[in-house]
Each structure stands twice: as C-alpha cells, then as structure tokens.
Image: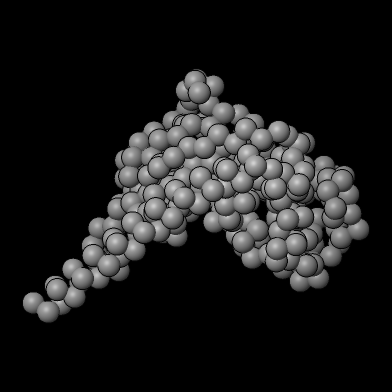
Amino acid sequence: MNWLSSKIELREISHVFQSHDRRPVNALEDISLQVSAGRFVSLIGPSGSGKTTLFNIIAGLQQPTAGQVLIDERDVTGKIGLVSYMMQKDLLLPWRTVLDNVVLGMELQGISISKARQLALPYLYQYGLGGFENHYPAELSGGMRQRAALLRTLLCHTELILLDEPFGALDAQTRAQMQEWLLQLWSDFGKTVLFVTHDVDEAVYLSDEVFVLTARPGTIKARLEISLDRPRSRQIVTDPSFIRLKETCLALLADEDIAGSILKLSRDVARKGKAQR
C-alpha cells in the first residue's frame, strides 16, 4: 500500500503509563499501520494489548509517549474532533429522544438542532429507526440503542470512524443482525472504519483487513488481507476461504495468550520475590 494513499497513518506509536504503584507500564510499542480511504479494518488482540489506548490516541484523547498520528498526510497527534468515536456503551443521553440523540454530534459541530433534525430524520426511517424518533433510550432494546448510537456516529462530518467493540454486549442473534446493518451503513456512507473486537468471526466477516496485536506491550504481529467478495452474506462463514482466515487469526491469538500467561507468571514471581526481601 502506498503511504500517500492512506486516510490514516500511525507511525511508531508507543505509550507508557504509570501503574497504581507508580511503576512504568509499556502499553504500546512501535505501532505503525496505514489504512486507505473507505476501508473497513479490524484490530484484534488479547485483553490488555492496548487496543482501546490506541483508539484514545487516534481520537486525540491521550497523547502518545512517542510517534505520530496522521490523517490525510497531516500530523494530528493529540488533536480532538477529527474522528468519530463510538465505545462499547452506547452513551445515549436518557433525557433526549432518539432523534435528538442522533443529532448530538452534528449539534456539537455547529449545526442548529432544527437543521440537524431535518437532516437526520430521513436516515432514521432508512435505517430501521423510523417511528422511534420521539422515543427515549429507556424504551429501546439493546440493538435499537446501538443503531441510534451508530447512526449518530456516522452522521458526524468526519471521514474516519472508530468503533470499539460496539456489539460486545449484544446477544448472538442481535449481534449478527447488527453486523449486517453496519455493513450496509458503511457501504452507503463510504467512510473509513477502524473496528476493535475480540470476536474473530466478526473481524473476518466485516473487514477488508485485520491487524493482530501482540500481548502487552501491544505491537502489530500480523496483517491479514480479507479478500472475500463483497457484498457478503451470512453464508460466507461456511466458505473454506473464510474458515482458513479465521483459523489463521485464532492461531495467532493462541500464541499471544500463551505469551501473555508466561509474562503474567513471571511478573507475579518477581512481585513475590520483591515482597519477601
């Protein structure tokens, strides 16, 4: 891939933070990746590999210890408001209706609420929220809440979307429905998506590329090109090519689980030895 064609580039991102006992913890180490405009890219890795920290750095919410974030070839390290970021919890405001939650991002970007409502309402009807615009979040199912949160994220005037395990709390059937719904939105809106998940099937099903992170300190272990035809139907999960990609991801993650267990054991032994001195 040509660096100049990239929507986002991460160059040698590293991050060190202090633990509760003030010891330095190396969370991320020398992460470099590049994503072309309009691609759907997933990040998978063991728990604690720094995926959410990396998203916080991309969004400008945390400053990396070292490295650069570039969007459209501009250094935007530490700058906020340039990407749309949805976390696992939908974070809908309980006192606002569905419509007014969906338009919140547009309001924050300076669009009047009346204009934002006018722009957003047709999308609610197009993407399965029609008739719910005057309902409140407490009246919605988990899947409907996630639809509202995703639509809010996509309607912001940013071309790069960060989705951090948005379907992690959903049951299997709702999750599958939301995956197909998300692919339709991504196809219609043409945005660049970075997606964090622990679900290998989900990563392979949704993505053009999958990056596998190592156990802490997180770094890029492998990049897999997902050369499966689009649009994708649910039946693709039984295709031999899909199964091979899934097995490759699982093997890479299994290695990291073993490495992480060994690292944890060595740390525990070191702490016990220090305590006994």
In the picture as drawn, the residue positioned furthest to the left comes out as: 277
Answer left or right for 25 relative to 149.
left
Task: State whether residue 215 is above or below residue 41.
Answer: below
The residue positioned farthest toward the front in the image shown:
240
Say above or below: 163 vs 82: below
Q: Nearer the viewer, residue 210 or 108?
A: 210
At x 71%, y 40%, the residue is 186
Name of the residue lying farthest toward the right? 131
Q: Residue at x 88, y 49 (%)?
A: 125
Residue 230 x/y as whole percent? 73, 34
- Compared with residue 4, is residue 227 higher up or lower down, i.e. above or below? below
Q: Position of residue 84 (x, y in %)?
A: 61, 45
Q: Residue at x 28, y 61 (%)?
A: 263
Depth check, front residue: 171 or 55: 171
Q: Is residue 182 left or right of residue 74?
A: right
Tally the numbered discs: 0
Question: Where in the figure is residue 47, as x and y percent of width and height?
Answer: 45, 60
Q: Can residue 99 be seen?
A: yes
